[in-house]
Image (cartoon, rainbow, N blue to C red):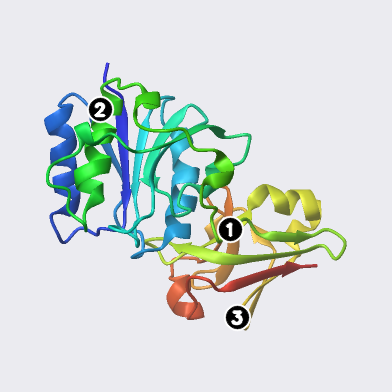
Amino acid sequence: MPRIITLTTDFGLTDEYVGVIKGVILTRTPEVAIVDLSHLIERQNIPQAAFLIRSAYRFFPAGTVHLVVVDPGVGSSRKLILLHADDHFFLAPDNGVLGLFLKSKYFQAAYEVQCEQYYLSPVSGTFHGRDILAPVAAELAAGLNPETVGPVIAPLALKKLETADAEIDRGQRVITGAVIGIDHFGNLQTNIIGSSLDDLYGDLKTTVKIKVKDTVITGVQPAYADQGVGEVLAIVGSRGYLEIAVNQGNALQILDSGLGEKILISL
């Protein structure tokens, strides 16, 4: 039975790119189920895509094929890879977008995609998502043995993610993180794992100081409505990471902040 294929790209919704990728997949494997995770990743924002796919994949059955196309180096000598991690399969450029799966608790195997017999012809120098990754994803969903995709790659040879998890200073009880994504509501998504707040601060989590630019937020709230309408707050979002939000408002606009903004948490 064909597997599920998820799609995560920075292609947007204006052009034909997403639809064409689906057309390639469905031509090869008509019975496959295709799920759009997001096509509104900020252009070429590898960390945003990396955190999205790590947060989302676990809600799909084992064996799902996840196609991630955020590829600033398309057409260059960068590798295309198939990663087997936590019983899922991930197809993407080797640019760090799968770097969060290289830890031993996730990683199972990796292969360089070198199976030209499955590619579209000719291969465009600007659209490897369509001509290489989409047909290979379709073949995997139809049952292709992943070991036949190409040579094995050691995890140490794969590109790491430049934006890693937040830094934790246990002695000073300080967490330093950053904004790595912005959702449709204007919430600032950070790389600070929610469980790290419980681990470092315990019950004091409700009194910590969270600094974003010149704004200092007191405490982590359990719900948006625990602050007044229009007020800035910190909350652990559905991904399990800290977010900066505004109750019924837009934190991106109100704080005039954005990707890469430093987040500092202390007592």
Q: Against 67, is 251 above or below?
A: below
Q: Quadrant of the C terminus?
A: bottom right
Q: Earlier in the sequence, mark 1 or mark 2?
A: 2
| Residue 227 is at least partly visible in this image | no
Q: Quadrant of the N terminus?
A: top left
Q: Residues at badges 3 and 2 in contact (C-beta under 8 Å)?
A: no
* Residue found farthest to the bottom: 214
Tell me the residue that label 2 is attached to.
139
Label 3: which secondary element:
loop
The amino acid pointed to by label 2 is Glu
Work out how far the residue at label 3 is from the one at label 2, CA to CA, in angstroms: 48 Å
Tag 2, which secondary structure? helix
Q: Which tag is nearer the camera, tag 3 or tag 2? A: 2
Residue 50, horizontal then vertical, whole percent: 47, 52
Q: Which residue: 51% across, 47% down?
A: 158
Q: Position of residue 156 (x, y in %)?
A: 59, 44
Query: Circles 3 and 1: CB distance less than 8 Å?
Result: no
Q: Which residue is mark 3?
A: 213
| Dot label at residue 191 | 1
Which mark lies nearer to you, 3 or 1?
Answer: 1
Hey, what amino acid is under mark 3?
A: Lys
Tell me what residue is drawn at x 25 percent, y 48 percent.
Answer: 129
Q: Tell me the distance, in whole angstroms, between the alpha carbons under discs 1 and 2.
A: 34 Å
Q: CA distance from mark 3 to mark 1?
A: 16 Å
Which one is earlier in the sequence, the residue at label 3 or at label 2? 2
Towards the viewer: 120 or 28: 120
Residue 105 visible in image:
yes
Task: State the image quarter where residue 226 is shown.
Answer: bottom right
